[in-house]
Amino acid sequence: MVRVVEISPGLRHDPIELARRNWIAAGWADAADGMALVTSIMRVQQLLLGRIEALLRPHGLTFARFEVLRLLAFTRRGELPVGKIGERLQVHPASVTNAVQRLEEARLVVRRTNPDDGRSVLAEITVAGRSLVELCTVLLNEQVFRQLDLAAAHATDVVRGLDELRRGSGDFD
């Protein structure tokens, strides 16, 4: 049985660096930096998602639901087929269906049959959904996206490096 221990913020020593040194000591020096990179990405994802969710929770949103609303608000007509939402957000269709269903229950989107297709379902952002996503976008811009504790030049380098990883993994051409 694997025991997962939650690491509290503000540790005196970096546990990922310790793991990297252990990797080297175990004879896996050629994989140590890769392990540290992957583990760092996963930890940063946890930290950022925690900050984002704490801001969105009082507004009844998760980051996944925010992303759906933001995507719909960016479209010309405020609507997209549910399948297209999944493609653009790169998430499983079941996750999109669940997010759209929750947003519909909250009256932030409406679902209807696609008149151009008849087989697919459109999700359309409501006035309330548009208002909420604008408010939450301002919050996230002010309290997360502009406050990354990372110099702008470093952020650009990180994005380029991650793009290289994503492209190499076949995420896009």
Image (cartoon, rainbow, N blue to C red):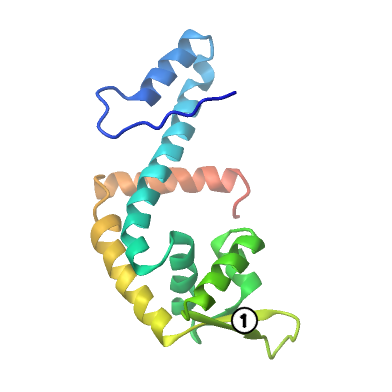
Q: Residue at x 36, y 44 (%)?
A: 47
Describe the element under mark 1 as helix, strand or loop.
Answer: strand
* Residue 21 locus on image (x, y percent): 41, 15
At label 1, counting other C-alpha atoms closer than 10 Å, the crowd grade (few under 14, some 14-19, many 20 or more) is many
Q: Quadrant of the C terminus?
A: bottom right
Q: Residue at x 44, y 39 (%)?
A: 41
Front residue of this view, candidates 162 and 129: 129
* Residue with the mark numbered 1: 122
Q: Up-down: is 53 above or below 9?
A: below
Q: Is residue 65 left or right of residue 16?
A: right
Q: Is residue 143 left or right of residue 2?
A: left
Q: Up-down: is 65 above or below 162?
A: below
Q: Residue at x 49, y 48 (%)?
A: 163
Residue 60: name its quadrant: bottom left
* Residue 151 locus on image (x, y percent): 24, 46
Q: Amino acid at mark 1?
A: Leu
Q: Is residue 125 left or right of residue 53?
A: right
